[in-house]
Amino acid sequence: MVSVVLVGGGTAGHTSPMIATAEAIHQIDATAQLLCVGTPKGLETTVVPAAGLPLRLIPPVPFPRALNLDLVRLPIRLRQATKQASAILREVGANVVVGFGGYVSLPVYLAARRSHIPVVVQEQNVLPGLANKVAARFAAAVLTSFPDTPLRGAEFTGMPVRRAITELAGRGRAADRDAARRQFGLPESGPVLLVSGGSQGAQTLNDATLGGRERLLKAGVSILHVWGPRNFPEGEVAMEDAGGARYVPVSFVEDMGQAYCAADMMLARSGASTVTETGSIGLPCVFVPFPHGNGEQYRNSASLVEAGAGLLVTDADMTADKLVAVVLPIITDPAKLAAMGQAAVAIMRPGSADRVASVVLKVAA
């Protein structure tokens, strides 16, 4: 029996491909023993158990970007977390470690290297994170979601997406549209705009949506607004325009596949998971990249934008007026929406989770 340890966490950008890969491994080898490793503060504490996967927790080891006390404490924290990771790997008899990046990954990578356990790196973004840059130097395999990710020895396999998304791409969003709209209390007719800033939400997107919602509703566009748990305002309720279009606010959506089905277009950050999932199912997007970090979100959406499958608006430019001006001409034009959706599907590679799982099992053997 092969023992696979999957490590990643913090946001959906890490947890979604981790869960997708775990599902694909079990599809190929039902006897495989799987264990996920995350941190106590990440989204993984909710979504990993919900997916039926076992989870162990170790403290995150963030890398300070400034000279401060946290930087002085870094070696101690890293050593302690690596020691905990080593104990977990020994306990489960790990044959391979699959890492998806994030603050939790580096200690597990180092623990695996010390124990001579092979490592497989899966990088979701065009611009790789620090933990995956380090691990790529000694990994048995380095897999990327985008073809031009600059990692040593990288193989482009595509982003692992959950089987539910793969199946949705196969049958088409239209098959589940009416049921999804009923689930969220949206009208079955008329265009729907989905707004989501990822698992944590995005204030810029929330503010623009609030400022533009009355104009969108009057134009017959309904809105499914996923605020993010930290941003959801107390007392915010659904509202309906005289013409029948509805604004439906929610804090969080467990199954984003259903939200995708309900929508004709999406306003989103351009995290790697969002770009890949929406592209694979042909949902046109207006991408508003997160303005901080190393700029990976600009690069993530570039291929879809260049192909005419999506639009890019900077965070500084995303206002209520800009939202209305960009969305209305497209979301009210079925032919334009269809063309954008077809362009997106042509770019995103299907079957990525199975490809990653196959590499993992080969390395483990």
Image: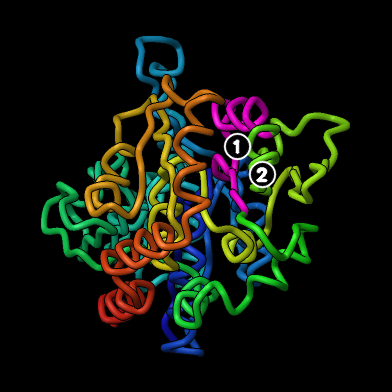
Secondary element type, mark 1: loop
Residue nearest the viewer, comparing 296 with 111: 296
- Residue 75 visible here: no
The magenta stretch spans residue 14: no
Q: Judge left or right: residue 321 versus residue 139.
A: right
Secondary element type, mark 2: strand
Q: Which mark is residue 26?
A: none
Q: Give percent across and percent down for residue 151.
A: 16, 49
Q: Tell me what residue is drawn at x 31 percent, y 80 percent.
A: 358
Q: Give percent across and percent down for residue 126.
A: 25, 46
The type of residue carrying mark 2 is: Val
- How many circles with numbers are drawn on the protein? 2
Which residue has dot 2 on it?
226
Magenta segment: 192-213
Whether residue 114 is situated above or below residue 268 in the rendered picture: below
Q: Label 2: few (<14), some or many (≥20) within 10 Å?
A: many
Does the CB distance between marks 1 and 2 fall below 8 Å? yes
First in residue order: circle 1 vs circle 2: 1
In this picture the colour scheme is rainbow
Q: Tell me what residue is drawn at x 45 percent, y 18 percent.
A: 70
Q: Nearer the viewer, mark 1 or mark 2?
A: 2
Residue nearest the viewer, comparing 336 with 230: 336
Whether residue 332 is situated above or below residue 296 in the rendered picture: below
Which residue has dot 1 on it?
201
Q: Tell me what residue is drawn at x 60 percent, y 53 percent.
A: 44
